[in-house]
Image: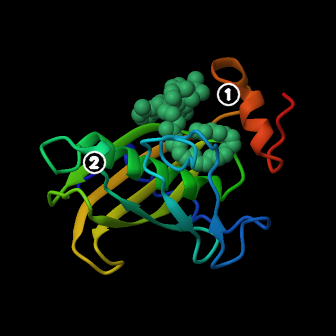
Amino acid sequence: MTRSSLTTPPPDASAPAAHPAAPAAGSSLGAHYSRCFGCGDDHPTGLHLKAATPDGVTVEAEFTVGEAHQGAPMLAHGGVLAAAMDEVIGMSVYLFHKPYVTARLETDYLLPVPVGTTLHLRAWCNGITGRKAYLEAEGRVGAPDGPVAVRAAALFIEVGMEHFAKHGDLAAIAAEHQDFEVNP
Ligand SMILES: CCCCC/C=C\C/C=C\C/C=C\C/C=C\CCCC(=O)SCCNC(=O)CCNC(=O)[C@H](O)C(C)(C)COP(=O)(O)OP(=O)(O)OC[C@H]1O[C@@H](n2cnc3c(N)ncnc32)[C@H](O)[C@@H]1OP(=O)(O)O
């Protein structure tokens, strides 16, 4: 992965550890919001990512590129692929049971991805320091050990739930989440 210093953890970053309340190894992860473009079942043209965690700290997910995701004819749009990386990385940092948002997302595109391809995504955290989490993801074609089509590195920043109350719709999140304190 070609990544900038902004998405590379500093030497004093701590290694991530599984949160005591993280889902058990092998658990499926549901959508964090039913209308989310990345994972929501109720989004008509979203990515409908299906994800699980093998160990409580990393996330594996599948995304099948649909006709609604084209850039060039019958090829995935690069921004859609970046959204898939953002989503699977967001799911992995959510395992730490704190609200984070993407501050920076860097993406390498290695192979074109035709419509109909199932991408096998994996995301993990390389380190945490203060409010900053340094994360990485990859998308492989056709199988978990298939050729890598996309790689991403990201900086996520921890925010309070007031971030979503002030800028978004906290009630909509609260309605679907009993696992977060949503009473700022
Ligand atoms: C998304 C759903 C949320 C639901 C939450 C509820 C429950 C959670 C449930 C489920 C979540 C599960 C899955 C989520 C999955 C996918 C979603 C993907 C995530 C997204 O899609 S989310 C949308 C896009 N995202 C934004 O909408 C962020 C807009 N943005 C801001 O809201 C602010 O910009 C913020 C908060 C980032 C920082 O603002 P701030 O005022 O709090 O802090 P400040 O600026 O001081 O930065 C502190 C330190 O970070 C450094 N820093 C900041 N930005 C940087 C950058 N770009 N590059 C390099 N360094 C940067 C500074 O340099 C400083 O560093 P230092 O401390 O060393 O000085």
- The tag earlier along the polypeptide, 2 or 1, is 2
Question: What percent of the width, then of the height, locates residue 136?
Answer: 41, 58
Q: How far is the residue under mark 2 from the one under mark 1?
A: 31 Å
Depicted 149 relative to depicted 103: above or below? below
Answer with the quarter of the image where residue 162 lies: top right
Residue 125: percent from the left, percent from the top? 51, 61
Amino acid beneath label 2: Glu
Rendered-image quadrant of the C terminus: top right
Kind of residue at disc 1: Phe
- The residue positioned 57% from the left and 49% from the top of the image is 41
Q: Confirm or reject: label 1 Cβ below 8 Å from ligand 1.
A: yes
To which quarter of the image does residue 174 belong? Answer: top right
| Disc 2 to disc 1: CB gap under 8 Å | no
Residue under label 2, please give it. 67
Q: With 18 as the anchor, is 40 left or right in this view? A: left
- The number of callouts visible is 2
Position of the N terminus, as image quadrant, is bottom left
- Give left or right: position of 164 versus 68: right
The answer to whether any part of residue 161 appears in the image is no
Q: Residue at x 16, y 50 (%)?
A: 74
Dot 2 alpha-carbon crowd within 10 angstroms: few under 14, some 14 to 19, many 20 or more: some
In the image, farthest residue toward the right: 183
Q: Ligand 1, what quadrant? A: top right
Can the viewer see residue 35 in this picture?
Answer: yes
Residue at x 18%, y 58% (from the top left corner): 114
Tell me what residue is drawn at x 83 percent, y 48 percent.
178
Q: Which residue is mark 1?
A: 164
Q: Residue 17's quadrant in the figure? A: bottom right
The correct choice, above or below, for 93 with respect to 149 in the image is above
